[in-house]
Amino acid sequence: MPNGILIIDKPAGWTSMDVCAKVRGIFHEKRVGHGGTLDPMATGVLPVFVGQATRAVEFAENGRKEYVAGLRLGLSTDTQDTTGQTLETRPVTADRSDVEAALARFRGTIQQIPPMYSAVKINGQKLYELARRGREVERKPREITIYELELLDEIAPGEYRLRCLCSKGTYIRTLCHDLGEVLGCGGAMSSLRRTMAGGFRLEDAVTLEDVQTRGEALLLPTDRLFDAYPAYTVPSAGREKRVRNGNPITDDALPDGIYRVYGQNGEFLCLSRAKGGVLTAIKNFFGG
């Protein structure tokens, strides 16, 4: 059965679940999941997990993500992007230096109110379902972190391209909206391309057409997601058996930290944490 990770360059107009459905059909494999939703208008890096690799989805979802976004000043919309209904237009007096200065207040750990057009649930209902019925409800601010935020260029009068490296749960649409409010003219996201997710970048990405043509040859091994962690090979058959039975093992020489753990034949077994010479699995990846 196919197992591994595909880094899809998601096309515009597709939902993340559309991509998963397409991959499901290509591989005839029910177990397919993605590592972080992209809006239909967005393009770029969408890690898709196939077969056993779906056990790793949570680790991709929780990591840092990088985006290049278009910010159009002078309008506010109901979706906070240019696909929505325009609520208000205002003259733009801000110039490039004003935009540069405004970015400073959004760097670091900040509070962000999720947009109404989002999958956030309140009292069991998704916000976008309420928004489509014309309802707006109070949303609590959420803590997010914007690690890097820079202005790349001015692509048209009043329209800029931004690069943002951020934590899970950051809405770039909302960032564009909030920047517009700070600048006093309103703002909406005009484009979005994800350039990094789960440690994978655009240069790792393939198209759905590539997957249709080349299939399993494009699957990356699951342990690629954990390249940032050092590798550890279980030193004996006895200890490998303990790992496969879900038990911790000891190695007094192992420094504290997180490791990619491999069996004696090189099979990726699990992601584990070492503490005080005891290695305990965080997540197992062996088996059917």
Image (cartoon, helix red, strand yellow):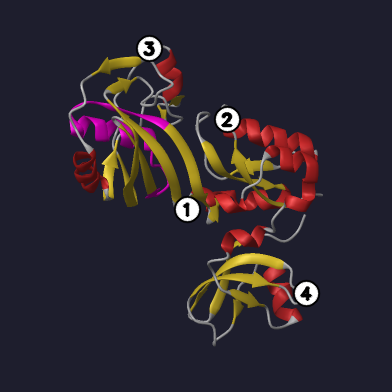
Amino acid marked by disc 4:
Asn
SS class of the residue under badge 2? loop
Separation (CA) of disc 2 from disc 4: 39 Å
The answer to whether marks 1 and 4 mark residues whose Cβ atoms lie closer than 8 Å is no
Image x and y of residue 96, in percent: 23, 40
Amino acid marked by disc 3:
Gly
Judge the density around disc 2: few (<14), some (14-19), many (≥20) Cα neighbours within 10 Å.
Answer: some
Question: What residue would you read off at disc 3?
Answer: 134
Does residue 32 lie above or below 118 as drawn?
Answer: below
Q: Earlier in the sequence, mark 4 or mark 3?
A: 3
Tell me which residue sits at (78%, 52%) in the image: 217
Does residue 201 lie above or below 81 as drawn?
Answer: below
Q: Is residue 29 left or right of residue 189?
A: right
Question: What residue would you read off at disc 2?
Answer: 15
Read off the magenta span: 165-190
Separation (CA) of disc 3 from disc 1: 33 Å
Question: What residue would you read off at disc 1?
Answer: 63
The answer to whether marks 2 and 3 mark residues whose Cβ atoms lie closer than 8 Å is no
Judge the density around disc 3: few (<14), some (14-19), many (≥20) Cα neighbours within 10 Å.
Answer: few
Q: Earlier in the sequence, mark 1 or mark 4?
A: 1
Image x and y of residue 191, in percent: 44, 32
Image x and y of residue 32, in percent: 68, 41
Q: What label does residue 265 carry, if any?
A: 4
